[in-house]
Amino acid sequence: MGGVFKAYDVRGVYPGEIDEGLAYAIGYHFRGILEAEDLARGARVVVSRDMRGSSLPLATALSDGLRASGLAVVDIGLATTPMNYFAIGHLGTSGGIQVTASHNPARYNGLKFSRRDAIPVSSETGIARLEELVRGSAAPSGPSRAGMETADIAPAYRTHVLGFVRRSEPRLRVAVDVANGMATLYRSLLEELNIDLVPLFFGLDGSFPNHEANPLKPENLVDLQRAVRENGCALGIAFDGDADRAIFVDDLAGAVGADMITALLAGPILERFPGAPIVYDIRSSWATREAIAAAGGEPVRERVGHSFMKATMRRIGSPFGGELAGHFYYRENYFADSSLITAIEVLNEVRRAGRSFAALLAPHRRYAGTGEINFRVDDKDGVIRRLAGEFGDGAIDYIDGITVQYPDWWFNVRPSNTEPFLRLVMEARTPETLAAGKAKVLAILGHPADEGHQA
């Protein structure tokens, strides 16, 4: 079992770290982390899976464990993670579990958990307790106490997602790279968006034969960028393995930071919800905050992680939120992330503006930034204390790690929730200021483990 219980999910190598026995035990003990209000929804749990070879046996064992505990299973079969979220809300179940390892390589698998209304389960809100239950007592085998049904949510999901379409003209050519992942299921939906689709790597294949299903790594965008250039596309879209994240490429084949998408969409969303709070993560550009404020919204910074973003959005009633890792959240979608809704919103805005995607983004791309850089650090807390001492003349907050802001540059250093790294993001008004600030911070952080990786 080891370290498979993570901050936001259970994930590990199959079958060495995660196997059918663990999936059964997790299913059996899942009831122990549900609340009375969850169970009042009828003690039913949505189960779905991605296309990995290990996903069906894990989903079967998981379902057996759920049913043995008295939780009925609603099996929706092969589905994206956003489809799992939608099914929980649409069917009014007690919660849901998606069998997926998201963007991880083929040898991995895992489980993502939600309560009623697609409320996420994180380490703080249930995963740590689930680990205690699984470690603390064996899950008894025996006849299932609860039933199982299957459900086809595709028609309802199609209606829901297409409800976000507000402009269907002009027709645009769009390259889409699904990396043989679950966004393959979106092909017919994409073709209803009045686009000339340039498809890349459609077809479910959990071995990921073409490239990793992680669009945050620049090398995994190369094929999409080539397709945009060669086909004269208006934009390109790359989905990750379970299709909860989307990364965009502009018409000049340049990668678009997800914070730029948050900035771009803030305006049209605030036209529909005037004065509303818009949530963005602490790594996002100053341009994101400024775009929200310029559109009359209230910019709300939040720490990294979907459970934190969604909880804050629920608490304040925010209609929209975005993270640098390519997650975008919508109040009208049970406060859950949806890559496909985001693709539709971007198409809406490109069509409305009547300008190229790159031209539309240009006003927001006015600062110099590093992207996210990883550093292997043994004493994470000690390094953060050193940064606080060295940069004590700046405005400091500790929403997530440490953020230091000056009039012409800022940086954030935070401990990874999933890997043994400190992660740095820095931005400045000019490249020269950025280089000077980076040199000062790296004098404390040391040599980067890699560059350009976000997670």
Image (cartoon, grey):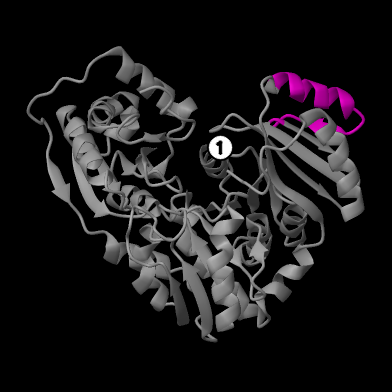
**Picture coordinates of residue 292 (x, y %)?**
71, 57
Report the quarter where the N terminus lies: top left
Residue 156 vertical position relative to residue 378 in the rendered view, above or below: below
Identify the image quadrant of residue 265.
bottom right
**Picture coordinates of residue 87 (x, y %)?**
31, 52
Identify the image quadrant of residue 162.
bottom left
In this orientation, does residue 71 appear? no
Q: Residue at x 61, y 46 (%)?
A: 454
Query: Considering depth in this image, is 261 or 5 the residue closer to the camera?
Result: 5
Q: Residue at x 32, y 51 (%)?
A: 50
**Picture coordinates of residue 214 (x, y %)?**
50, 52
In the picture of the structure, the residue carrying the numbered disc 1 is: 308
Q: Which residues are magenta?
A: 381-401
Magenta region includes residue 382: yes
Query: Considering depth in this image, is 313 or 107 the residue closer to the camera?
Result: 107
Query: Considering depth in this image, is 144 or 252 the residue closer to the camera?
Result: 252
Q: Residue at x 91, y 52 (%)?
A: 432
Residue 61 left/right relative to 359: left
Query: Considering depth in this image, is 380 or 399 the residue closer to the camera?
Result: 380
**Picture coordinates of residue 420 (x, y %)?**
59, 29
